[in-house]
């Protein structure tokens, strides 16, 4: 019986399997293969055999063979893409989670205007990120409102000639801002699921507000926190569109000082260096995989379902 | 410590726009709960028991009235300052903490006052010559000692390292009691703590609550809708209906002398039997049968509701009250008889000795006068005889 009807099941699954094969599995496998191909030529799809060199070149451990004078892009990854991505990840993710949690808990405790504020905080989410980026670009313009407020008119944040650290601050603020709504939404729905009796119990047990937050709310919200943490770490490692949205180009100088890993990958493809792009993508994949694995492992002890 | 409720009222406001009326959850409640006793708040679902308890705990603010703990007015005191332990209707144990941490949690928030001593152990005095008092947290060792002591009282020592979801209902309930008891509260409040348990465990746990209450001597208020539960373990009970006190006193007293039809109906299993009857010449009649003679007072002739407890009806071939027996249910120790009488308000039930000889069909019965009451048909249907 079961065997006879098996083809039906496959038939139902066929559309998604075909789509995933074309758009997910095939590119994924190709990327892995290309990452290990020597001098892969994208146009004619030929290579000169197997190699580990692509990784070395991306990480600027191995010099590229051709020519004596190295092109500028060889140090992009090690000098800009990796540090920038790490800064973005480890600054924006923890900060945005803490801020989102604080806002969600705050919203949850003022039932009166909750709906209005919820809407306000959700507006950035339904707004195009490039549009939000343009708003931030105006705010951080060298004659923008931020400089007006801090009384430093004319010194650039994100415009040509701005120091890398200042552009980084503006970028992180922008990323945190635009990542808040989704997190707040998740936390609010999690908070709504917590039985009010635990808070009554905490009151009877004479726990203060902060202690209740740390010992009751956060543990009971831990599944949502883990979900948000894992998805935002993955998202932050892949940050790219925020740089485009805010700065519009890979750097505040003539170069690429605002590169992220994905920005580098994108530009490599433009330079017809699909093999280096693939190698960088594989490295990023491994880092994200390892990092997510660590989070799951740590969460085994800390998350209470 | 004695607890007094004075004119305690709780009104949940409705919404006039949507035509939702106010809910008078508790109405002008006056109670004195004696020191060191187990006191039961008894009443059907929705009569305001939990609301009363929450007001005593400080979780809900009274609309009017006062709450006194001994000679301290605690009406406006926040819950953590009242020194109460509360066991919630569904325990509300913190699911992410072990039993040990659950019980220890209230202690980690506790501050004890202590006289400050100098290096040689002498009491340090403050500016006015009084001993200098400092507040401090409990140490880990002190907490551990208290947790283990309390765990021993409620017998949960073996489960200290489990999470609440790894415990049975009865064990969870004991943990909840431990969490409430560990800080040595002035008052212990229990909200239907047995409602989640099966019949056998319920019996066992209620004995345990009784034992714990006796051994600690803490004034305890126990909320239940199960009259048997309330009768069997409490020192005193109060019966409530729709937020209004009906009667309070010793359980047996309330059972033997119910103030009105509601109380008589609510107490006792199987429930009391009601008949349409009347008082004539100071005698109570059901149909033609004279079931009781009123001796202590003179009452005018009137229609009444007659209530007879199930144990107050005794089969006797020469008895006054005729019955038609429908069903005989053997319950081991005794027999439950279900029968009909033309004047009944619902099928009658009565309990007789297992060796009584009864058969389905028409029988006659005697009525024990002290198990027979007459209730007025007017107002709150007070008992008049
Ligand atoms: N927050 C509230 N808002 C409006 N009405 C409420 C609220 N809480 C309780 N009530 C009403 O007050 C009345 C008393 O409720 P309460 O919870 O005290 O009943 P209870 O005696 O504990 O019942 P149960 O035995 O079912 O637990 C009920 O009619 C209930 O609907
Ligand atoms: Mg209740």
Image: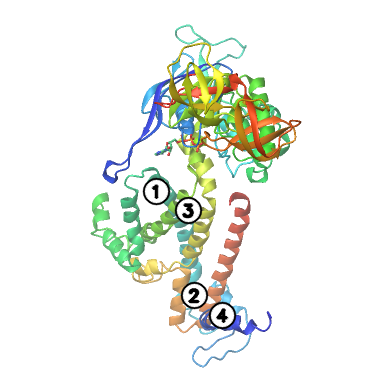
Mark 1: few/some/many CA within 10 Å (<14, 14-19, 20+): many
Q: Nearer the viewer, mark 2 or mark 4?
A: 4
Q: Return the chain for callout 2.
A: A
Q: Which residue is mark 1?
A: A103
Q: Nearer the viewer, mark 1 or mark 3?
A: 1
Q: Return the chain for callout 3.
A: A
- Side of A177 where B259 appears, left or right: right
- Picture coordinates of residue A188 (x, y %)? 43, 52
Q: Which residue is mark 3?
A: A94
Q: Which residue is mark 2?
A: A74
In space, the residues marked 2 and 3 are separated at their CA atoms by 31 Å
In space, the residues marked 1 and 2 are separated at their CA atoms by 43 Å
Judging depth in this view, the residue of A21 and A53 nearest the camera is: A21
The residue drawn where x is 38% and y is 22% is B65
Q: Earlier in the sequence, mark 1 or mark 4?
A: 4
Q: Earlier in the sequence, mark 2 or mark 3?
A: 2
Q: Of helix, strand and loop, which one carries label 3?
A: helix
Where on the image, by quarter, is ligand 1?
top left
Is B224 situated above or below A129?
A: above
Instruction: Look at the numbered discs 1 and 2 and tell me whether their residues touch, using CB distance below 8 Å.
Output: no
Q: Nearer the viewer, mark 2 or mark 3?
A: 3
Q: Nearer the viewer, mark 1 or mark 2?
A: 1
Q: Quadrant of the N terminus of chain B?
A: top right
The residue drawn where x is 33% and y is 55% is A119
């Amino acid at each position: 019986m079961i065997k006879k009807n098996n083809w039906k099941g496959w038939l139902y699954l066929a559309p998604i399997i075909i789509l995933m094969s074309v758009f997910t599995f095939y590119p994924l496998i190709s990327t892995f293969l290309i990452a290990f191909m020597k001098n892969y030529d994208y146009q004619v799809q030929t290579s000169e055999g197997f190699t580990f060199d692509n990784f070395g070149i991306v990480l600027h451990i191995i010099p590229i063979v051709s020519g004596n004078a190295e092109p500028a892009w060889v140090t992009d990854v090690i000098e800009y893409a990796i540090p920038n991505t790490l800064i973005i990840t480890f600054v924006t993710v923890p900060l945005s989670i803490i801020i989102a949690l604080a806002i969600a808990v705050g919203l949850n405790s003022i039932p009166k205007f909750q709906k209005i504020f919820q809407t306000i905080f959700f507006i950035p989410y339904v707004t195009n990120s490039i549009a939000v980026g343009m708003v931030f670009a105006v705010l951080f313009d060298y004659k923008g409102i931020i400089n007006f407020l801090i009384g430093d008119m004319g010194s650039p944040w994100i415009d040509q000639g701005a120091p890398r650290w200042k552009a980084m601050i503006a970028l992180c603020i922008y990323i945190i801002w635009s990542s808040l709504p989704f997190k707040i939404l998740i936390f609010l729905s999690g908070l709504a699921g917590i039985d009010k009796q635990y808070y009554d119990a905490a009151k009877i047990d004479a726990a203060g507000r902060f202690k209740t937050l740390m010992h009751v709310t956060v543990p009971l919200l831990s599944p949502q926190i883990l979900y948000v943490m894992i998805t935002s770490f993955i998202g932050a490692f892949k940050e790219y569109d925020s740089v485009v949205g805010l700065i519009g180009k890979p750097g505040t100088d003539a170069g690429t000082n605002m590169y992220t890993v994905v920005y580098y990958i994108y530009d490599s493809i433009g330079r017809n260096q699909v093999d280096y792009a693939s190698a960088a993508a594989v490295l990023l994949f491994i880092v994200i995989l390892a990092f997510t694995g660590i989070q799951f492992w740590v969460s085994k002890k800390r998350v209470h379902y | 410590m004695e607890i007094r409720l004075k004119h305690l009222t709780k009104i949940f406001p409705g919404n006039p726009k949507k035509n939702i009326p106010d809910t008078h959850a508790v109405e002008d409640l006056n109670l004195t709960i004696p020191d060191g006793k187990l006191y039961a708040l008894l009443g059907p679902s929705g009569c305001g028991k939990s609301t009363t308890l929450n007001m005593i705990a400080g979780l809900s603010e009274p609309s009017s009235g006062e709450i006194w703990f001994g000679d301290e007015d605690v009406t406006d005191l926040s819950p953590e300052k009242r020194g109460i332990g509360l066991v919630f209707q569904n325990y509300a144990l913190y699911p992410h903490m072990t039993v040990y941490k659950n019980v220890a949690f209230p202690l980690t928030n506790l501050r004890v006052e202590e006289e400050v001593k100098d290096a040689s152990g002498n009491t340090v005095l403050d500016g006015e010559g009084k001993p200098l008092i400092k507040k401090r947290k409990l140490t880990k060792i002190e907490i551990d000692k208290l947790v283990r002591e309390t765990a021993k009282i409620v017998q949960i020592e073996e489960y200290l390292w489990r999470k609440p979801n790894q415990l049975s209902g009865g064990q969870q309930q004991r943990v909840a009691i431990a969490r409430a008891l560990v800080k040595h509260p002035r008052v212990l409040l229990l909200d239907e703590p047995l409602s989640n348990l099966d019949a056998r465990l319920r019996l066992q746990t209620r004995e345990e609550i009784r034992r714990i209450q006796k051994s600690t001597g803490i004034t305890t208020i126990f909320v239940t809708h199960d009259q048997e539960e309330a009768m069997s373990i409490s020192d005193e009970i109060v019966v409530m209906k729709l937020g209004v006190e009906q009667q309070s006193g010793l359980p047996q007293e309330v059972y033997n002398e119910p103030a009105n039809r509601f109380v008589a109906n609510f107490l006792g299993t199987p429930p009391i039997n009601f008949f349409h009857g009347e008082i004539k010449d100071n005698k109570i009649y059901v149909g033609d049968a004279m079931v009781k003679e009123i001796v202590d007072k003179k009452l005018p002739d009137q229609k009444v509701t007659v209530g007879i407890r199930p144990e107050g009806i005794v089969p006797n071939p020469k008895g006054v009250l005729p019955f038609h027996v429908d069903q005989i249910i053997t319950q081991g120790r005794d027999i439950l008889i279900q029968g009909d009488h033309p004047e009944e308000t619902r099928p009658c039930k009565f309990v007789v000795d297992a060796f009584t000889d009864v058969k389905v069909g028409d029988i006659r019965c005697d009525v024990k006068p002290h198990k027979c009451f007459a209730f007025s048909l007017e107002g709150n249907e007070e008992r008049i005889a």
